[in-house]
Image (cartoon, rainbow, N blue to C red):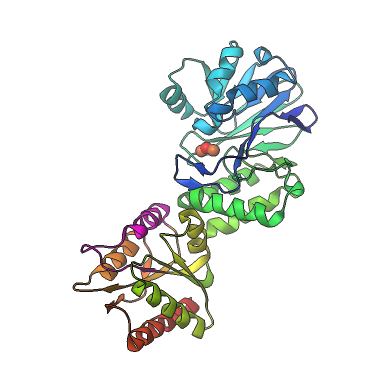
Amino acid sequence: MVVEIKDGVYWVGVVDWELKHFHGHELSTHRGSTYNSYLILDEKKVLVDGVWTPFADQLIANISEIIDPAELDIVVANHAEVDHAGALPTVMRHARDATVVCSPKGLDSFPGNYHVDWDFQAVKTGETIDIGSNELIFVEAPMLHWPDSMFTYLTGRNILMPNDAFGQHYATAGRFNDEVDQEELYEEALKYYVNILTPFSNLVSKKIEEVVGLGLPVDMIAPSHGVIWREDPMQIVSKYQEWAAQEPECKAVILYDTMWNATGRMAAAIGDGFGDEGVDYKCLHMALTDRNDALVEVFKARTVVVGSPTFNNGILAGMTPILEELKGLRMKNKLGASFGSYGWSGGAAKILQERLAEAKIEVIRDGIEVKWQPDAEGLATCREFGRELAAATKKT
Ligand code: FEO
């Protein structure tokens, strides 16, 4: 359903209730998503971003409720990723005379992804386009989320359209932040930040300072996924500043995989040690836990403890994906340690410790291993290990 979000500005996007995985299967999206596209009617007719390829016809139908898509003068393409630009080849078949406005890096990513020869106009930070009564102002935002990413600001209506930044994978009936469950909204906004933007936290902080420094009034922040921030729109900017600082809470998360529950019992005993010291913790069996949700818990926690039995001289495969993600996300201000059980030869704890170091997680102390099933003494050792890690967690 098309929604007029401000005078002459329409949301013409799509709500995808069915989406359960994004980026192929890299990111879980339990609550679906939206692909937000905005139509601006001024002397010039402007479309800002499109939708994912399978919804191209829906986008055309939505635009057609307001104008003939052939009337579009400008298509602002803030980012070439397929969830926003996949429908643009269809749009451009209708809007044959439209100019496609993108960042300078877009001159590489759009032809590279779509093999098209549109009438491109590259704009740099601070450049403007007069569309009649109002102007579009552009701010390049490299790596938020690709090198080509760009923010577009509409004067007169005071709407910032920052594409992926400030988004959420969150399908809802309402289009605005004041129309949805706040707890769900912030769960999804944080999960989105953690899984997509964490490695670029320094850039997020700098970009926010730059945009705020422009002194533009902001009545709405209209991202390309999820709800539009209408009520107190700067609240999400403050949250991003907080998240970008990566100052974890005094708590721990214990990630493990286990075969016959020896390592699982060690995890529980280590958790008891944290509990003894009054440090909140979660135990997550990674063969049974959504990886992207687990990463949110790691993001929030000061200490991450990883465990696996030794298996074929290595670690259980259930731990591999999250360790790979931790390496890529480069979270800051984390402490870590490792543990595991073994039968005839150990080594998993050492391998896990090396993986923590690769992820730039500061290892508190060497890991511990228990042979076969832990007995009372083995569990006591684990509990003491947990207490020691908890003390280090509290110190910082
Ligand atoms: Fe929502 Fe980077 O695309």
Q: Residue at x 76, y 47 (%)?
A: 179
- Tell me the residue at 37%/81% (across/down): 382
Q: Look at the image and tell me whether residue 218 can be seen.
A: no
Is 68 in the magenta? no
318, 115: nearer the viewer: 318
214, above or below 358, in the image? above
Q: Considering depth in this image, is 165 or 4 the residue closer to the camera?
A: 4
- Span of residues in magenta: 305-330
Q: Is residue 153 left or right of residue 288?
A: right
Residue 40 position, x and y percent, is 71, 25
- Residue extending farthest to the left is 344
Which residue is located at x 50 percent, y 79 percent?
Answer: 394
Q: Is residue 364 left or right of residue 296?
A: left
Q: Please tell me which residue lies in front, 376 or 206.
A: 376
**Image coordinates for residue 74, horizontal then vertical, percent:** 63, 19
**Which quadrant is home to the N terminus?**
top right
| x, y percent for residue 285 | 43, 65
Q: Relative to 326, say whether 118 is above or below.
A: above
The relative height of residue 201 versus residue 135 in the rendered view (above or below) is below
Q: Compare residues 235 and 300 and report the one nearer the observer.
A: 300
The answer to whether residue 157 is seen in the rendering is yes
